[in-house]
């Protein structure tokens, strides 16, 4: 399994529960109990997901406090966003090219007189 | 393992070889042999990575052609980019708040007359 930062980030994001946990933490720090509440999962399962997020640097957890609240650290997402952004631009460029092509095609169809009626 | 589209996309991106393959395909379609060339990997290993990318809808491959060239399909990246973008904004907002705080702190420090020299 790849262990570079970008791979860790994407791997951590490849699970809907972990993405939901990050979404929750974007609203403020929370304890494991608070985080587990909306899920039909054991605390152990939630803790495991939190460890994956922590390993990817996407959350940080207080070492001292009794309940070790977790908080979002969105910094690794910036690099991930940048990587994806390059290819999203590629996609948009392709869509623009397709648009231009379809527009050109439509103009051609409009400007060329139809011969369908004449040969009848 | 999660099988929703977003999870498949992020999972496919969680490997540096697969990201490099996508980067190569952004330059145009290529056969497995062409794709394998820069890597110290067997064709079987490259083919396996391509199957993961294909499963996530990130590449498409010709069914008929003898060499089945692969081509990038960046559409799933748009959704991934959107998801990450929301949190990148969260991060930027946090950075802006920190900036404002530091600026305010600096102004406070500048405007408050120092008493260090007076007590001497």
Image (cartoon, coloured by chain):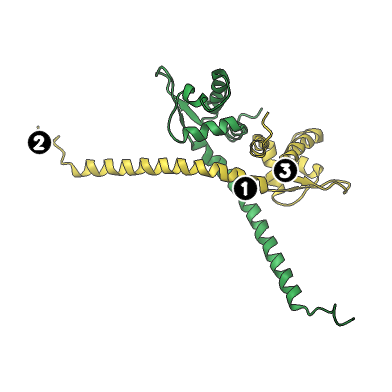
Chain colours: A green, B yellow
Answer yes or no: do the residues labelled 2 and 3 have beta carbons within 8 Å?
A: no
Please tell me which residue is depicted at 68% across the width and 28% down the height of the picture: B1
**For mark 3, what is the residue?**
B57
Quadrant into which the C terminus of chain B falls: top left
- x and y, in percent, of residue B5 in the image: 67, 39
Q: Is residue A120 above or below residue B16?
A: below
Q: Secondary structure at mark 3?
A: loop
Q: Secondary structure at mark 1?
A: helix
Distance, label 2 to label 1, CA atoms, is: 62 Å
- Label 1: chain letter: B
Label whose residue precedes the other's in the sequence (2 or 1)? 1
Distance, label 3 to label 1, CA atoms, is: 12 Å
Residue closest to the eye, A114 or A107: A114
Is disc 1 surrounded by few (<14), some (14 to 19) or many (20+) residues within 10 Å?
Answer: some
- Label 2: chain letter: B
Answer yes or no: do the residues labelled 2 and 1 have beta carbons within 8 Å?
A: no
Q: Quadrant of residue A28?
A: top left
Q: Which mark is residue B78?
A: 1
Is disc 3 surrounded by few (<14), some (14 to 19) or many (20+) residues within 10 Å?
Answer: some
């Amino acid at each position: 399994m790849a262990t570079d930062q970008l791979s860790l980030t994407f791997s951590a994001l490849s699970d809907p529960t972990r993405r939901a946990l990050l979404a929750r933490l974007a609203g403020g720090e929370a304890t494991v109990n608070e985080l587990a509440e909306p899920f039909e999962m054991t605390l152990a399962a939630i803790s495991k997901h939190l460890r994956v997020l922590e390993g990817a640097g996407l959350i940080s957890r207080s070492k001292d406090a009794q309940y070790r609240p977790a908080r979002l650290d969105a910094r690794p997402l910036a690099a991930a966003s940048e990587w994806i952004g390059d290819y999203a631009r590629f996609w948009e460029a392709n869509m623009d090219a397709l648009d231009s092509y379809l527009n050109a095609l439509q103009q051609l169809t409009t400007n060329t007189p139809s011969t369908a009626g004449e040969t009848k």
